[in-house]
Amino acid sequence: MMTTRDAWVVIPAKSFSRAKQRLSPLLTSSERILLARSMLADVLSAACGVIKLNHVAVVTNAEDVAQEAARLGTVVIDDGGADGTNSAVVAGLADIENRGGELILVLPSDVPAILSEDVSTLLQAAQGNAAVIVPAPRDGGTNAVAFTLARPLQPCFGPDSFARHIAAADRLGIEPIVWRNARIGLDLDAPADLFDFLDLNTSTATDRYLRSIDLGQRRLGMGAGKTGRASVDAAAELSSGLVAQNGETSAVFRGA
């Protein structure tokens, strides 16, 4: 059986200066850059709580991201000028296969609420040539996939990618495991997401940074005081287990 010694976490990332443009109504350019750095650090921290730094790979062609990832001690893989997330993931998987990797978890760089136990659960569930998919709570997207390189799942990230990842698993003859997890589901793309994230009160670099710029005061200015997406989803999703696509709850892996 594969162990975390055979596992890799793959995190595609674009330049900090190009990240999170949708947050421009709330954050300045320099603030978005520092937010992107903080989020990447938090995702890397969660991954490194389970596997060694030399099996955590940031895939990028952006010099600022590569320098930061190298400073943090992770592997940096050049995406070869990939034209999007999926091409970057493909480049990363090819490199990792050459390094002898077997078990893969692909994560975005903007899910700072993720915990090490989430990483561990996903990797364990993907052993035995399974495919695990974490859907985004909106836009039909996907926020994480785990699989083995013996039966590699085609990366299909983007809007409506959840259905495409299910179809990709079907083509491999795999009944995918679906895990609805609010922490991984909370990617920080829109202003409301930042407030939802702060409501979780996490011990993360991202939380500390957002509080350091007095985001709460901006929240009042925007009239955002109602319960947001994260808190609404948390009660239902954080109690969810890993479930097969047919809806049966897994008896082996229970979500956090």
Image: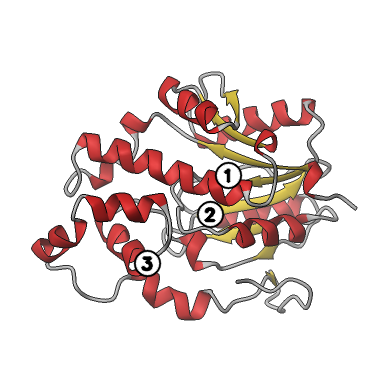
Which mark, residue 58?
none
User: How many other residues sit within 10 Å of disc 3, few (<14), some (14-19) or many (≥20)?
Assistant: few
The residue beneath circle 3 is 201
**Residue type at numbered disc 3:** Asn
Label 3: state its secondary structure.
loop
Crowding at dot 2, Cα within 10 Å, few <14 / some 14-19 / many 20+, comes out as: many
- If the image is split into quadrants, where does the C terminus sit? bottom right
Q: Earlier in the sequence, mark 2 or mark 1?
A: 2
- Residue 17 visible in rendering: yes
- Please tell me whether residue 175 is drawn above or below residue 60 in the rendered image: below
User: Which residue corresponds to mark 1?
Assistant: 156
Nearer the observer: mark 2 or 3; the answer is 3
Mark positioned earlier in the residue sequence (2 or 3): 2
Residue 140 is situated, as x and y percent measured from the top left of the image, at 47, 59
Q: CA distance from mark 2 to mark 3?
A: 24 Å
Image coords of residue 89 (percent x, y)? 60, 35
Are the residues tagged 2 and 1 within 8 Å (C-beta)?
A: yes
Question: Secondary structure under badge 2?
Answer: strand
Residue 168 showing in the rendered view: no
Q: Are marks 2 and 3 in contact (CB under 8 Å)?
A: no
In the rendered structure, the answer to whether residue 114 lies left or right of residue 214 reads right
Pinpoint residue 64: horizontal percent, then vertical percent.
41, 24
